[in-house]
């Protein structure tokens, strides 16, 4: 007995993205049915405590996710606002999440997510289900990776080989593989909200790997 449902995306610091039935910008968890059959989550559990696996129970009446579709669960400690409002909130400093079968013991899925940023979600990569990344929130839609467009970057001439650590706080090491005919390179670092926080121009470059 196994349900084709996973935790797909979460938003632990919702300030302006989307609101619930009461018009409140609460945190949420998005589940995804990755199969071609309808799934009923009646009696299943969600929890943010590894020592309390039955913390919040889905309603005892039908809770369907249609094939290849999504379901949004509001994490606001306000169960009086609707059937899909949990008795716990998400921690923006990071925590554990688990989705369990009605037996209250068997995990369908779980994730321990890191510190979160306002209006930036955390979700599964669209190319690799086991890989998680910070994202542009996309409730009830396909996940959207964060990205910064820069017309000056030409990947045919240089390649970023490694970013360490990623994500970082005060320091980061960037390894570049630089091709010929490049003697100057501008490097900018952006926050998760897309704001430029650092910029530097490096001159007199030679081909090869650089840190």
Image (spheres, rainbow, N blue to C red):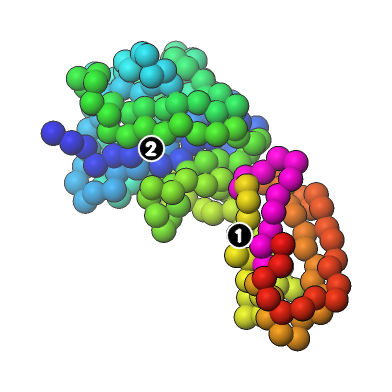
Q: Are marks 1 and 2 in contact (CB under 8 Å)?
A: no
Mark 1 secondary-structure assignment: strand
* Residue highlighted by disc 2: 7
Q: Position of residue 210 (x, y in %)?
A: 71, 67
Q: Extreme bottom residue here?
A: 181
Q: Position of residue 141 (x, y in %)?
A: 44, 49
**Which label was assigned to residue 43?**
none
Q: Position of residue 38 (x, y in %)?
A: 21, 42
Quarter occupied by the N terminus: top left
Q: Quadrant location of residue 127?
A: bottom left
Mark 2 secondary-structure assignment: strand
Q: Give the CA separation, mark 1 to mark 2.
A: 29 Å
Magenta highlight: main SS:
loop
Q: Is residue 116 left or right of residue 21?
A: right
Local packing at callout 1 (Cα closer than 10 Å; few below 14, some 14-19, many 20+) is few
* Residue highlighted by disc 1: 162
Between residue 119 and residue 163, name the one nearer to us.
163
Does residue 182 appear anywhere in the picture? Answer: yes
Between residue 170 and residue 135, name the one nearer to us.
170
Q: Extreme left residue here?
A: 1
Local packing at callout 2 (Cα closer than 10 Å; few below 14, some 14-19, many 20+) is many
Q: Is residue 171 magenta?
A: yes
Q: Is residue 21 magenta?
A: no
Q: Position of residue 190 (x, y in %)?
A: 73, 52
Does residue 154 appear anywhere in the picture? Answer: no
141 lies above or below 91: below
Q: Which residues are magenta?
A: 166-176
Quarter occupied by the C terminus: bottom right
Between residue 60 and residue 177, name the one nearer to us.
177
């Amino acid at each position: 007995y196994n349900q084709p449902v996973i935790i797909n995306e979460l938003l632990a610091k919702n300030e302006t993205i989307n609101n619930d039935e009461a018009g409140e910008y609460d945190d949420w968890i998005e589940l995804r049915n990755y199969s071609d059959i309808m799934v009923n989550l009646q009696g299943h559990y969600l929890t943010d405590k590894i020592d309390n696996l039955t913390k919040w129970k889905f309603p005892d009446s039908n809770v369907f996710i249609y094939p290849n579709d999504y379901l949004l669960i509001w994490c606001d400690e306000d169960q009086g606002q609707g059937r899909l409002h949990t008795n716990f909130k998400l921690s923006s400093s990071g925590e554990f999440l688990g989705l369990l079968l009605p037996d209250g013991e068997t995990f369908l899925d779980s994730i321990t997510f890191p510190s979160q940023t306002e209006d930036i979600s955390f979700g599964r990569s669209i190319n690799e289900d086991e890989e998680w990344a910070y994202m542009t929130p996309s409730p009830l839609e396909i996940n959207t990776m964060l990205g910064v467009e820069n017309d000056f970057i030409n990947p045919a001439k240089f390649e970023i080989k490694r970013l360490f650590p990623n994500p970082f706080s005060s320091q980061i090491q960037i390894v570049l593989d630089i091709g010929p005919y490049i003697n100057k390179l501008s490097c900018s670092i952006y926050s998760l909200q897309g704001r430029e926080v650092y910029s530097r121009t490096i001159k007199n470059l030679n081909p090869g790997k650089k840190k």
